[in-house]
Image (tube, helix red, strand yellow):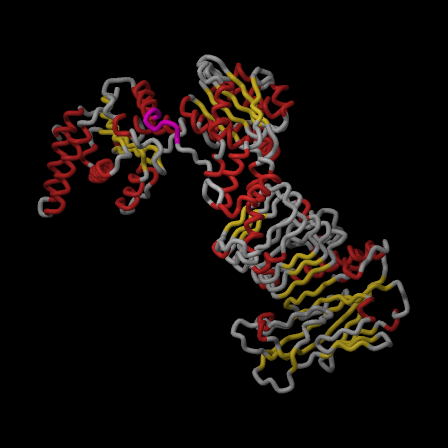
């Protein structure tokens, strides 16, 4: 085995910053599928992060930059000397870089392993090594620089071969690998914690208390300990901190995050697969059923010293997934430790744990330290903010998550009030996820460079701060599981975005307005709910969830990808019918409100008016006339659905043009110049409610008379400068070719469906 010379190199290395724990240098053709492969697998099983150049580097790449980076980022080096190692210039250059790294840094250590070659052959470059160097010198004899490199290789081989290592010739590889791995574990020691600095506040004392309950000194006993406490108090953090310190002492280890979530999402098999995958380092396992999974867990672990951590267990049944009817202590070997994390202490006691560690709130000193780290990035309180700290901590009462949330809210508020002048414009990520008591989002108007906002799990948040609309660089907004927020969403404006589809809108119960204009890449909505009675011939494309009782608005302009799809006109018309059905149902129940008038307006390429519009006319004077006089005094009609075919021209001559009054648009047509698609005829679908016939509104020269006839004149229109990137005014001439409309009465939904089947 190795002498103490190996260990003497590592006195200051155990907690150095690194990416890889071990870098393995070897001749692939000699040992890849034998010794090195077995060693690599054993190291990975122990949770040791190994860099193997033949796996991590692509063939054909220049090795210098990639290898140098990997070598400098490694804590320990294993060099597997084999018969043909010296014949590879790749291996020799790699070894020279390793030796150079060791010479210039106190961190790394080299462990030589002599696989099928005598150490003296490597040291003296005799035998096969002598022949290999003769070939190198012959190849590079005319290149002085290369010859110097060859000489350096000789020196490095001699130096590394003089380090005490393992001569495994004629020995059991299994036993030798076990000794090598254990030595590496001892050298590496407990890894530096990957937990953020703020999560380490007060952790050492808690880790020691948990260790005492686990009785790690009882090497033959199996101990099961529970961790309990309120949400956000640090149960998982504590378990993770202890796990990182002791996992290397066990044959098999597994830390399963959020067992309850895996159980819900992937059933029982999902939890079992994760346990087996982590503890046995086996991926893509085929487990047919829970019984097979339980048996596999038992057969693999019942004689092994095992460390298991099951986080966020909320049902006793979730613990039986690993053991079936057996006591969990009989499913693992002597010396094993099992930690179960649950808010429900009753679950832990029902399962028969040996002890329960109750995570307590932070002490005043630790709470103050956590506040300072989050607020000021230091471990001490700044003089001017002691009173603020006391106020925050009095509200948080030592709860770690509460302190973090209140920290952020206070800091943002102080910035707005001018109390501190930290550069919020540099802030790119705002993470308030799982702040379960958050009821107000901070104002972010000064954080204009925000790119990502995490609000996932803020279940009490009722609304988003309007300042979010000023964040032009915002690319990611996570509102997952914001149940209170989504249930109150009424207006969804997605204008001008580049997405291609929409998520499920089925839970947006109060949504009444959806704006998709100028979404040029938009292709399709989610699948239409099964309860919809639309005819099958109109459903050849995915349709939207528009059957909610409150969803009565759809604005759709210039969605180029969508309108190029087959049956686009029928599809969009079907959506409008669904919106109107929802609105009609509310009107029949006398629950209509002014806010819930159907706000329907779509412009898509089209040249024919659907037969459903039973009043159809050719426009003779570039205008639309809608005659409601036959039903003007009938209270049973609720509105008019209209369709117009037109095309637009952009002109430079502004003679006779006027600006559009954008403050009072009925209906809400948006005649932007980029609406024109190859000078095609456009179909404009819109809706006018009964109430709007009694209101005088102007846009595109609308005129309402008292005899129930409404007219719209399309004259020359000058667009606002703000509508165009170049800032130049555009002059749009609209030519109406024909139009149609249908007066909608209070008819049962079934009549709608019959008419739709016949006329769409």
Residue at the image position 23 percent from the left and 22 percent from the top? 167
Q: Which residues are magenta?
A: 185-191
**Residue occupying the far top of the picture:** 220
Quadrant in which the N terminus appears: top left
- Left or right of 648? Residue 701 is right
Using the rendered view, name the quadrant where residue 25 is placed: top left
Residue 28 seen: no
Residue 646 in percent (x, y) is at 67, 74
Is 326 rendered above or below residue 674? Answer: above
User: 577 or 49, which lies in front?
Assistant: 49
Asked if residue 454 lies in the magenta stretch, the reply is: no
Of 726 and 407, nearer the camera is 407
Give yes or no for residue 188 being in the magenta stretch.
Answer: yes
| 471 to the left or right of 79 | right
Number of labels in the image equals 0
**Which residue reaches farthest bottom?**
655
Above or below for 290 versus 15: above
Q: Residue at point 51% right, 17% down?
A: 223
Q: Where is residue 276 drawn, in percent x and y? A: 49, 26
Q: Quadrant of the C terminus?
A: bottom right
Q: Quadrant of residue 640?
A: bottom right
Residue 22 % position (x, y)? 32, 32
Q: Nearer the viewer, residue 505 or 336?
A: 336
For the point 46% across and 44% down, which residue is it? 377
Q: Is residue 312 visible?
A: yes
């Amino acid at each position: 085995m190795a002498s103490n010379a190996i260990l003497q190199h590592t006195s200051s290395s155990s907690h150095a910053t690194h990416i890889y724990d071990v870098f393995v240098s070897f001749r692939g053709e000699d040992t890849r599928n034998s010794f090195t492969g077995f060693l690599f697998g054993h190291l990975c099983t122990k949770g040791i992060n190994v860099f193997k150049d033949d796996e991590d580097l692509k063939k054909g790449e220049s090795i210098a930059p990639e290898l140098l980076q990997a070598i400098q980022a490694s804590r320990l080096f294993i060099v597997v000397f084999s018969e043909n190692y010296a014949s590879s210039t790749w291996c020799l250059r790699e070894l020279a870089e390793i030796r150079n790294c060791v010479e210039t840094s106190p961190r790394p250590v080299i462990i030589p392993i002599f696989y099928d070659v005598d150490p003296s052959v490597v040291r003296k470059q005799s035998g096969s090594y002598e022949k290999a160097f003769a070939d190198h010198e012959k190849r590079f004899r005319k290149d002085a620089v290369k010859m110097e490199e060859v000489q350096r290789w000789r020196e490095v081989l001699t130096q590394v071969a003089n380090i005490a290592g393992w001569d495994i010739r004629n020995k059991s590889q299994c036993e030798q690998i076990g000794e090598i791995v254990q030595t590496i574990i001892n050298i590496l020691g407990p890894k530096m914690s990957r937990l953020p600095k703020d999560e380490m506040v007060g952790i050492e004392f808690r880790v020691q208390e948990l260790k005492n309950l686990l009785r790690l000194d009882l090497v033959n006993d199996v101990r099961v300990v529970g961790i309990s406490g309120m949400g956000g108090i640090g149960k998982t953090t504590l378990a993770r901190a202890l796990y990182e310190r002791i996992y290397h002492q066990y044959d098999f280890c597994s830390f399963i995050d959020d067992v309850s979530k895996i159980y819900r999402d992937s059933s029982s098999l999902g939890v079992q697969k994760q346990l087996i995958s982590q503890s046995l380092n086996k991926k893509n396992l085929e487990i047919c059923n829970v019984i097979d999974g339980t048996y596999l867990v038992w057969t693999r672990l019942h004689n092994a010293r095992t460390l298991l951590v099951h986080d966020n267990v909320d049902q006793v049944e979730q613990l039986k997934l690993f053991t079936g009817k057996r006591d969990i202590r009989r499913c693992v070997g002597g010396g094993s430790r099992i930690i179960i994390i649950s808010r429900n202490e009753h679950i832990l006691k029902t399962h028969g744990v040996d002890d329960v560690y109750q995570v307590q709130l932070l002490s005043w000193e630790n709470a103050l330290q956590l506040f300072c780290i989050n607020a000021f990035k230091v471990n001490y309180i700044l003089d001017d903010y002691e009173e603020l700290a006391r106020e925050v901590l009095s509200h948080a009462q030592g709860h770690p998550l509460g302190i973090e949330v209140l920290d952020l809210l206070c800091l943002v508020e102080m910035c707005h009030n001018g109390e501190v002048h930290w550069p919020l414009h540099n802030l790119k990520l705002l993470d308030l996820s799982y702040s379960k008591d958050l009821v107000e989002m901070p104002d972010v108007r000064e954080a204009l460079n925000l790119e990502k906002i995490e609000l996932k799990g803020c279940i009490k948040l009722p609304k988003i701060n309007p300042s979010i609309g000023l964040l032009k660089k915002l690319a990611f907004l996570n509102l997952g599981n914001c149940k209170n927020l989504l249930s109150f969403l009424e207006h969804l404006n997605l204008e001008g975005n580049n997405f291609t589809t929409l998520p499920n809108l089925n839970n947006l119960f109060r949504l009444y307005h959806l704006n998709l204009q100028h979404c040029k890449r938009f292709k399709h909505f989610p699948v239409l709910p099964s309860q919809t009675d639309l005819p099958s011939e109109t459903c050849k494309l995915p349709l939207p969830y528009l059957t909610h009782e409150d969803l009565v608005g759809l604005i759709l302009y210039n969605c180029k990808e969508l309108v190029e799809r087959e049956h686009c006109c029928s599809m969009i018309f079907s959506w409008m019918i669904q919106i109107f059905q929802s609105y009609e149902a509310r009107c029949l129940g006398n629950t209509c409100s002014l806010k819930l008038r159907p706000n329907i307006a779509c412009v898509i390429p089209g040249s024919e008016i659907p037969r459903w519009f039973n009043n159809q006319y050719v426009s003779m004077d570039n205008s639309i006339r809608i005659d409601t006089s036959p039903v003007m005094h009938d209270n049973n009609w609720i509105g008019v659905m209209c369709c117009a075919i037109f095309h637009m021209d952009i002109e430079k001559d502004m003679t006779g043009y006027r600006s559009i009054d954008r403050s009072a648009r009925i209906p809400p047509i948006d005649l932007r110049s980029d609406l024109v698609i190859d000078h095609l005829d456009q179909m404009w679908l819109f809706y006018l409610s009964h109430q709007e016939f009694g209101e005088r509104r102007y846009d595109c020269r609308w005129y309402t008379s008292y005899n129930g006839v409404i007219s719209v004149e399309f004259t020359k229109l000058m667009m606002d400068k703000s509508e165009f990137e170049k800032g130049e005014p555009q002059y749009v001439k609209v030519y109406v070719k024909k139009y149609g409309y249908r007066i909608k009465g209070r008819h049962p939904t079934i009549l709608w469906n019959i008419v739709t089947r016949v006329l769409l």
